[in-house]
Image: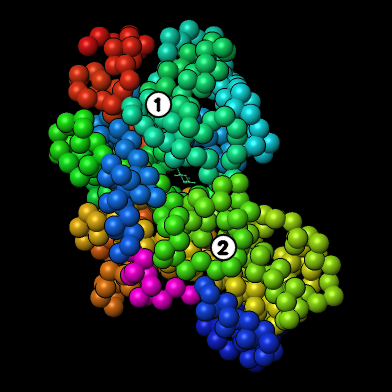
Amino acid sequence: MVGLGAKKPPSRKGSMADVPQDLLAQISRLEELFVVPTEKLKAISDHFVNELSKGLTTEGGSIPMNATWCMGMPDGNETGTFLALDMGGTNLRVCEITLLEAKGEFDIIQSKYKMPEELKTGTADELWGYVADCLQQFIEYHHPDEKIESLPLGFTFSYPATQEYIDHGILQRWTKGFDIDGVEGKDVVPPFEAALAERGVPIKLTALVNDTTGTMIASAYTDPEMKAGCIFGTGCNAAYMENVGSIPKLAHMNLDPDLPMAINCEWGAFDNEHKILPRTPYDIIIDKESPRPDQQAFEKMIAGLYLGEIFRLVVLDLHKTDCKMFDGQDISKLNKPYSLDASFLSAIEEDPFENLSETADLFQNKLSITPNRAELELVRRLAELIGTRAARLSACGVAAIAKKKGWTKCHVGADGSVFNKYPHFKVRGAQALKEILDWPADKGKGKGDPIEVLPAEDGSGVGAALIAALTMKRVAEGQHAGIRDPEAMLKAFGKKK
Ligand code: BGC
């Protein structure tokens, strides 16, 4: 017998012995809802391949497949000093990156500023004013008393944007809970530049970058086998390198068909028309109650912003229905939408004790609820189901890009809190990739797999700086750089053509 407080053995099958029949029935119901078997993964991936292609056509589909005007991978020889700005959900990070002569090396200084929660639903003026204030502070702090003419900036703006040029971007829609009026459908660069100009901040935006593109480029800087970049964090998305000839919606531009073009898939929008993803009633509630219903169907089943909320909705349902979970207890704290985040599920999955005592503490401290033993078993299984589904569905996207491009062997750089911190996410994803792509039995463990999803380099810092560097290089060489006004860009940095 395992004593109280003993470490849990790796297999947990036996633990269900103590679970009463009605909760066991609930667990089976949840497994039915959340387990995605191999055949379904394969069907999702196949549909995904078609949707990726559709997004590249003039007619389009639900996955935006945005051309980013990042036209080439770095070769490690890029040099220069660049600013990088990352407007994330919790923090705003400003970096100054110097790409060094030594291949693939760089120096970085950085400052983080808190992104106030109210900004996410405030006004556009407040948002751009705050961002410009942070940049101003950064320059005043790191370059006091220096006379700076102009610093090139790579701005990581991790939302779907239509780009006709790399130095502009029309926000298609807010995602990840942002809901600021008057920004959607407009170019985000002019108001951002106006806020900088108002404050006399000597910065010139050189490239507006998605975090996935930055991730791919930063990873390729040190690993030539990198072909795509993914983010599994608050949101979820991927970018990969396409060739212009495979992008029918760019045909009118008569570009060289062999020119590489990074595509920001915005795959969070996959299956917005609900044809294939196995949505549960809980996913449907999340969607309906989000600021943007009918958008980001795939993301809402995978991304960190939603994992805790899916869990909360299931538990609440189990409290209200026949099985009366937490019967007689005050569940008021559980009633608050988005009160649990993905780290709550991570902590449950990481509880090493046979009696799930850490999970019990977590419920007590966070929700003032005292679960009984059976309820603890159930919430543990539920966290596993939600976390596993997220990892397995993510693999469908990676497999789809690989299938579309005919890649059988490559590296994919990945970043984001879920990828980096959620227990077993990487290995569950690798296992699912193996099932989808029919790899031999000894594969699917991550390390050494034909398609390996690896922790990425700093995409929104180094990646954004590199993209700015690659853009400036193309401008200086007189190549098509996807920039609005190449002459003005050269002038801003005192360079001649
Ligand atoms: C955004 C993407 C971004 C992803 C990861 C999604 O919500 O639409 O642009 O890449 O989150 O941050």
Give whichever of discs 2 and 1 has the lower sequence position: 1
Label annotation for residue 168: 1
Q: Residue at left 52%, top 56%?
A: 300
* Mark 2 to mark 1 CA distance (whole Å): 34 Å
> Residue 164 sits in which quadrant?
top left
Which residue position is annotated with label 2?
Answer: 283
Residue 331 in percent (x, y) is at 80, 66
The C terminus: image quadrant: top left
What secondary structure characterizes most of the magenta part?
Answer: helix
Q: Left or right: where does residue 374 sit relative to residue 83?
A: right
What span is colored magenta in the figure?
35-45
Residue 97 seen by the camera: no
Q: Secondary structure at mark 2?
A: helix
Residue 190 in percent (x, y) is at 47, 20
Residue 94 seen by the camera: yes
Query: Vertical placement of 68 versus 455: above or below?
Result: above
At label 1, counting other C-alpha atoms closer than 10 Å, the crowd grade (few under 14, some 14-19, many 20 or more) is many
